[in-house]
Amino acid sequence: MYEEWPSRLDGAVVWTRTPSAGAVHPVLPDGCMDLLWAAGRLLVAGPDTHAFTPDDEGSVRYAGVRFAPGTAPAFLGVPAHELRDRRVELADLWGGAEARRLAERIDDAVDPAAELEAVALARAVESVPPDPLLSEVVRRLDSGGTVAGAAAAVGLGARQLHRRSLDAFGYGPKTLARVLRLQRALALVREDVPYAEAALRAGCADQAHLAREMRDLAGITLGAYEALANSETAQPSGSRTTA
């Protein structure tokens, strides 16, 4: 079973997944990055450009902190593009001794999710704040704005925005816009909005356009996604487990 709730860390979400039987749920691109605790391990899920299917769903207990787009690199101390489409051990980023200490602390906690969030909150205090210009870019793109419009609004040229987006999001602003648009459409589909209407309201040209984006970014059809979303063990497309 999957559950999530707002974190005390600005813009983040805390989530848990407990073992359960049922269909395997692919993790779809959402622009986010996650700090994960799983069976005594601490890992980081980088930004995805395509669906990721975990091979241990139903067998491992997870807790996670999902960071809003563009906010995790400052927390982790590594550019997002270095983690694109990857799941890595936290020890590779923060060192083995620190990762083991934190993992043991979370393992011993009564509530691992709350302890993981506490780790994130403490680390965030010591981190450089996320780039406010990139936060505005996310807001504008998530509202359906264009890349050109977002760049003009924050006073960045196309090359500058692309370079800073690689560090913050793991990919360029056009890819981020596609990912956020797909997530808007899927949120509508989960509310039982018809596919054609969901496509238009999310910013796609038509239902065929949304279907192509599903194929390219999610690797499944809209019908298959809706069936998973309606299943008893369904989890939001942003929950980021690892193999």
Image (spheres, helix red, strand yellow):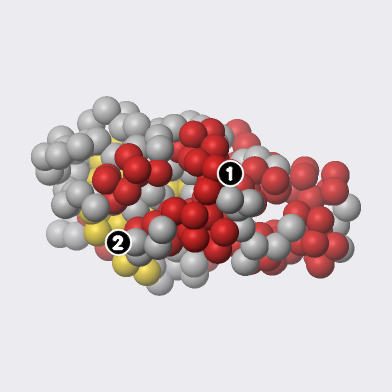
Q: Count the numbered circles shown.
A: 2
| 168 over 184 or under it: above or below | above
Q: Going by the image, does 217 lie left or right of 178?
A: left
Judging from the image, what secondary structure is the residue with disc 1 in? Answer: helix
- Residue 218 appears in the figure: yes
The x, y position of residue 108, in whole percent, is: 18, 51
* Residue density around tag 2, few if under 14, some if 14–19, many if 20 or more, within 10 Å: some
Residue drawn at x 81%, y 56% as measured from the top left: 148
Q: Nearer the viewer, residue 178 or 60?
A: 178
Residue drawn at x 61%, y 58% as measured from the top left: 203
Location of residue 186 (image quadrant): bottom left
Q: Which mark is residue 171?
A: none
Please name the amino acid that badge 2 sits on.
Answer: Glu
* Quadrant where the image shows the C terminus: top left
Q: Identify the residue position indicated by label 1 in the image.
A: 209
Judging from the image, what secondary structure is the residue with disc 2 in? Answer: strand
Q: Going by the image, does 103 lie left or right of 73?
A: left
The x, y position of residue 77, in whole percent, is: 58, 46
The x, y position of residue 6, in whole percent, is: 37, 69
Q: Identify the residue position indicated by label 2 in the image.
A: 4
If you read the primary sequence from the N terminus, does the residue marked by circle 2 or circle 1 appear first? 2
| 197 over 235 or under it: above or below | below
| 177 over 9 or under it: above or below | above
